[in-house]
């Protein structure tokens, strides 16, 4: 059964096409074709609706004596899907559409009504301009103004398109990549600056001053009050410490340093030891005869 579906037929070596008999067909013979309904219609016999795109078996024939600009017009016959009543439609090359001839009516279509309104307006304008020259001039002025507006809009669209045409996809991708790289670099620089500010911050040292430097309790009280401040007042505390240290150094330079108790005991011990050492012995006091 596979030989029925092949495209190329077998021709024997002794095949002679001139011996084939030519079949004479009538000039306007109807051909059976399978078609889809090009529009929605309603049967006049039973009122059944047949929608656009319905597949039907139809007969096609040429409309004799009717053409449009040399284009042949065809007629199609088909039957209703419910009551089998015959209907007929034909092609309409003038409007690039189909026209119902008999057996059915076409359903309402909004775009056809709009076309009819436009045609009505055109006929009305022609009738008005026929006897009034001023009306004709006014209509032509409006038409020229409308054309100028359309041309201006077209020029604007062209200029906009040319501006967009200058920007290619590759340049847009490069600009996006460059922006992303700059953003990442800026974030890295900010992070490095933050790390440096945290780990490489100069430390503030406060030197502790010995109590022996101070001669009066007022300076010691001032220093202690400065050391008791919070960490937020580090700069003030440092200034107070430097002032106290400077004053102590000046006083130590012009006034001799007082001796403390340990120094006094040590000097007394050394004096007593020296006295003991330098005292004459008994032999020296009472020499033997």
Image (cartoon, rainbow, N blue to C red):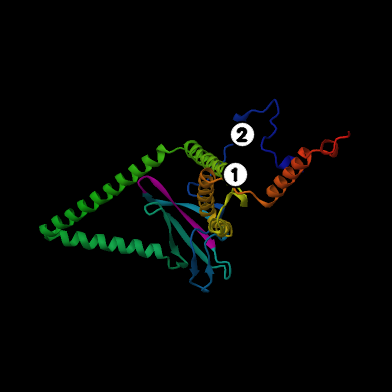
Camera-nearest residue between 160 and 87: 160
Residue range (magenta) = 68-78
On the image, the x and y values in percent for residue 186 come to 52, 42
Tell me if residue 224 comes above or below residue 70 in the rendering: below
Q: Residue at x 31, y 64 (%)?
A: 117
Q: What's the magenta bit mostly, secondary-structure-wise?
A: strand
User: Neighbour class for label 1 at 10 Å: few (<14), some, many (≥20)?
Assistant: few
Taking the image as shown, residue 14 lies to the left or right of residue 70, namely: right
- The answer, for residue 229, to whether it is visible in the render is no
Mark sitting earlier along the chain (2/1): 2
Tell me if residue 109 comes above or below residue 193 in the rendering: below
Helix, strand or loop under label 1: helix
Q: Which residue is mark 1?
A: 195
Q: Residue at x 35, y 63 (%)?
A: 114
On the image, the x and y values in percent for residue 131 come to 12, 60
Q: Which residue is mark 2?
A: 20
Taking the image as shown, residue 134 lies to the left or right of residue 273, namely: left
What residue occupies the far right of the structure in this picture? Answer: 289
Taking the image as shown, residue 31 lies to the left or right of residue 102, namely: right
On the image, the x and y values in percent for residue 36 come to 54, 57
Tell me if residue 3 comes above or below residue 56 in the rendering: above
Q: Residue at x 26, y 62 (%)?
A: 121
Q: How many marks?
A: 2
Camera-nearest residue between 188 and 144: 188
- The answer, for residue 38, to whether it is visible in the render is yes
On the image, the x and y values in percent for residue 163 come to 37, 41
Can you say which quadrant of the picture contains the N terminus?
top right
Is residue 73 part of the magenta span, yes or no?
A: yes
Can you say which quadrant of the picture contains the C terminus?
top right
Residue 283 found in image quarter: top right
- Distance (Cα) linking label 2 and label 1: 100 Å
Camera-nearest residue between 102 and 108: 108
């Amino acid at each position: 059964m596979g030989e029925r579906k092949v495209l190329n037929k077998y021709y024997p070596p002794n095949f002679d096409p001139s011996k084939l008999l030519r079949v004479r067909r009538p000039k306007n013979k109807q051909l059976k074709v399978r078609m889809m309904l090009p529009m929605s219609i309603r049967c006049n016999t039973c009122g059944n609706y047949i929608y656009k795109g319905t597949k039907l078996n139809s007969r096609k024939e040429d409309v004799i004596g009717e053409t449009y600009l040399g284009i042949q017009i065809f007629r199609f016959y088909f039957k209703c899907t419910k009551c089998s009543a015959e209907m007929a439609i034909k092609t309409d090359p003038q409007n690039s559409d189909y026209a119902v001839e008999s057996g059915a009516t076409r359903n309402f279509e909004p775009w056809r009504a709009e076309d009819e309104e436009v045609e009505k307006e055109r006929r009305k304008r022609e009738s008005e301009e026929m006897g009034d020259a001023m009306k004709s001039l006014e209509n032509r002025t409006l038409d020229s103004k409308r054309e100028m507006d359309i041309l201006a809009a077209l020029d604007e669209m062209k200029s906009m398109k040319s501006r967009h045409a200058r920007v290619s996809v590759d340049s847009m991708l490069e600009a996006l990549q460059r922006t992303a790289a700059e953003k990442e670099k800026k974030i890295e620089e900010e992070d490095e600056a933050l790390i440096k500010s945290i780990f490489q911050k100069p430390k503030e040292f406060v030197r502790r001053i010995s109590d022996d430097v101070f001669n009066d309790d007022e300076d010691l009280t001032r220093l202690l009050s400065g050391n008791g401040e919070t960490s937020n007042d580090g700069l003030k505390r440092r200034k107070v410490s430097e002032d106290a240290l400077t004053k102590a150094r000046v006083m130590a330079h012009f006034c001799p340093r007082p001796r403390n108790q340990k120094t006094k005991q040590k000097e007394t011990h050394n004096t007593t030891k020296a006295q003991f050492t330098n005292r004459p012995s008994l032999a020296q006091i009472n020499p033997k005869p």
